Image: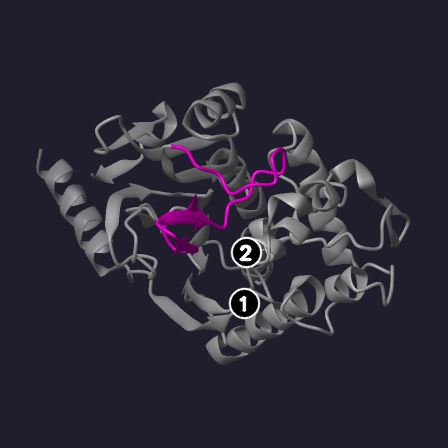
Amino acid sequence: MRITLFCSAIALMMASCSPQPEYAELNGFTQGTTYHIVVEKIPGLDVMALRQDIENLFTGIDNSLSIYNDSSVISAINFNRSDLTDTLFREVFRASEVISAESGGLFDITIGPLVKSWGFGPDAMKRFNPSMLDSLMSLVGMNKVRLEGDRIIKTDPGMFIDVNAIAQGYTVDLAADLIVRMGIKQCLVEVGGEVRTAGDKNGMGWKVGIDAPADGNFTPGADIQATIRLDDRALATSGNYRKFYVENGVKYSHTIDPRTGYPVRHTLLSATIIAPTGAVADAWATACMVGGKDAAIAFIEKYDFLEGYLIYSDETGAMKSWVSEGIRKMILTE
């Protein structure tokens, strides 16, 4: 008995004396929003050098995929100055093709002409009228654009590719991959509310908030609907409570249905999707918002790589939620 007690005491003392992991935080601005990164400090880590690597990565993504950057690869394609792509564009395009097919066309990166005509995007000026619908819809459809080697082929020069609904998720993937390649096994990357984690924060778990879809809730994390534990996964939320305008008493959201050409109008207020990667979570959150509550539930139950937290309004206007079983097990507070 004495030996057992002695050994237990030694083990307890060793555990209490072992150094606790320390974490560094990086914060800044990118892609018109904020980023927040937490990494475990490992021997030899140069935090300032890591910050510079991250900033360089973000600049590279902006120079490839930003429709707000006139000199980006995607802008050159959209304005027919070039048909040449780069690695980042090709990876996002191929991922978009897959998710477009899986979602039955609800996710579509060729929706740019419609987004612009409804007053969203780089030249936000509403000029849509029903007489324009047929001509606009002729420019929309993943079957009207394709990759041939390093080049993108558009069937009509008026097509405008917009990858904003997948780019931030893709960004957190690339940032997390960069950090892990440096030998850091525990990290959290958040860009504009899209999150990717690596590891489990040394057993403590990464805690991530799901925003409440209230009009005027413009800051991720300011109004939390639920807190979940997110280890080695990615999370993205799409909703119509931040990007919209009201005209003649009608609310027009930035989520456009590529099947109809009109902003969506249904009871689904926000869709939070958890998936293996940020790009997949980001794109599927958009597809769910386009499809609405019933379609979103069907997708989440069909694909085992998706989990979902849906917030919708019932027939009385009260806010309700639907939560998949996988996310239900992750909830810490609600």
Disc 2 or 1, which lies upstream in sequence?
1
* CA gap, disc 2 and disc 1: 8 Å
Q: Is residue 24 magenta?
A: no
Which residue occupies 54% across, 23% down? 303
Q: Position of residue 175 (x, y in %)?
A: 56, 60
Number of numbered discs visible in the structure rendering: 2
Q: Mark 1 points at which residue?
A: 31
Where are the magenta residues, as a range? Answer: 238-266
**The label number, if any, that marks residue 132 in the structure image:** none
- Horizontally, residue 128 falls left or right of residue 264, namely right
Q: Is residue 255 magenta?
A: yes
Q: Where is residue 327 in the image (x, y as percent from the top left)?
A: 35, 32
Position of the C terminus by quadrant: top left
Q: Which amino acid does label 1 sit on?
A: Gln
Q: What residue type is labelled 2?
A: Gln
Q: Where is residue 237 in the image (x, y as percent from the top left)?
A: 42, 45
- Horizontally, residue 320 falls left or right of residue 267, namely left
Other-residue count near label 1 (Cα within 10 Å), few / some / many at <14 / 14–19 / ≥20: many
Asked if disc 2 and disc 1 are in contact, CB closer than 8 Å, the reply is: yes
